Image (tube, rainbow, N blue to C red):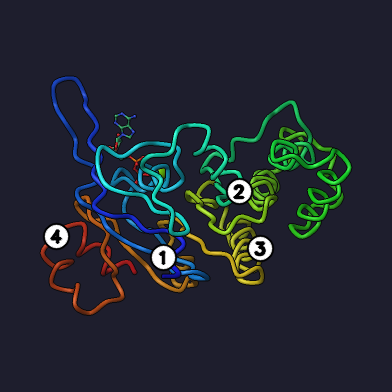
């Protein structure tokens, strides 16, 4: 088995007052080593929720999240944090950089937490920022950087520990088309060159088409939209139909 991420029968329900919203309904799915998979679906369908659950940042009501062949169900919070540090990089939609820290300090943080010396962390973080074209922005704080630059710092931070699995939540969602394409190319190049595995939410069809595979979140389930066997399933759902038209 060389699945880096495996989701089995994931259910997630949010309670809102007295009503319940089913976001994930027995969603199952896996990603093999080296694959780059697009997670698509209109906003509100549960993409962020699914990525948070995959990255052990949120818990499913039921089902299994298996990372690098390890079932994470019985791990305690410390063990989850450790696994995240060692194996997962996460890019938040709203970059989530620390405003009081410079670009290089933001990227150094996960390295310091995982035990690197200050000097090593600085050297590695600088290299990652250099690869993102930010060598002249090491000491800028997030507020002194453009949106595209901030997002590239966030990507550099997510890659700092060389994670085997990169989870990215609409990493270019807030950028203009030019920056979006540039940041995305940077991200894809890094993932491919280092043979990482990535699961990337986007509702940009052009970006989705650059990935190896596309799965749509439709009515709480993950459906491979490139698989012809799933066409009837998609046609039977209003969201599914829209996905087929757009992608
Ligand atoms: N903590 C929460 N409590 C209640 N409802 C939530 C919570 N988080 C997300 N939701 C709801 O779940 C749905 C899916 O949200 P989300 O995963 O953010 O979708 P997407 O990323 O596809 O836009 C939305 O309708 C949202 O309102
Ligand atoms: Mg989202």
Q: Assess disc 3: are there few (<14), some (14-19) or many (≥20) residues with their C-alpha within 10 Å of its C-alpha.
A: some
Q: Check disc 1 and report its element: helix, strand or loop.
A: strand
Residue 237 disc label: 4
Of circles 1 and 3, which is in front? Answer: 1
Residue reaching furthest bottom? 228
Residue annotated with mark 2: 86
Relative to residue 133, is residue 242 drawn left or right? left
Distance, label 2 to label 3, CA atoms, is: 22 Å
Of circles 2 and 4, which is in front? Answer: 2
Of circles 2 and 3, which is in front? Answer: 2
Q: Earlier in the sequence, mark 2 or mark 3?
A: 2
Of circles 2 and 1, which is in front? Answer: 2
Distance, label 1 to label 4, CA atoms, is: 24 Å
Residue annotated with mark 3: 186
Q: How many marks?
A: 4
Q: Earlier in the sequence, mark 1 or mark 4?
A: 1
Distance, label 2 to label 4, CA atoms, is: 39 Å
Residue 26 % position (x, y): 20, 51
Residues at badges 2 and 4 in contact (C-beta under 8 Å)? no
Residue annotated with mark 1: 31
Distance, label 4 to label 3, CA atoms, is: 35 Å
């Amino acid at each position: 088995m060389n699945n880096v991420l495996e989701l089995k029968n994931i259910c997630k329900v949010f309670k809102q007052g007295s009503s319940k919203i089913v976001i994930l309904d027995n969603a199952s799915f896996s990603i093999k080593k080296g694959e780059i998979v697009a997670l698509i679906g209109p906003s509100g369908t549960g993409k962020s929720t699914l990525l948070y659950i995959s990255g052990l940042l949120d818990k499913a009501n039921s089902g299994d999240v298996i990372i690098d062949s390890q079932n994470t169900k019985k791990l305690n919070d410390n063990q989850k944090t450790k696994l995240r540090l060692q194996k997962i990089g996460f890019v938040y939609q709203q970059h989530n950089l620390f405003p009081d820290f410079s670009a290089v300090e933001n990227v150094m943080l996960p390295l310091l937490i995982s035990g690197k010396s200050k000097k090593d962390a600085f050297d590695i973080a600088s290299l990652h920022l250099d690869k993102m074209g930010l060598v002249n922005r090491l000491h800028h704080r997030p507020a002194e950087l453009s949106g595209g630059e901030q997002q590239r710092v966030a990507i550099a931070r997510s890659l700092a520990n060389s994670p085997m699995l990169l989870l990215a939540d609409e990493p270019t969602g807030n950028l203009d088309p030019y920056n979006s394409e540039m940041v995305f190319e940077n991200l894809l190049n890094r993932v491919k060159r280092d043979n990482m595995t990535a699961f990337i939410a986007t509702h940009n069809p052009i970006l989705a088409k650059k990935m190896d595979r596309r799965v749509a979140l439709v009515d709480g389930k993950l459906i491979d939209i490139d698989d012809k066997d799933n066409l009837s399933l998609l046609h039977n759902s209003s969201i599914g139909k829209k996905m087929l038209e757009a992608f």
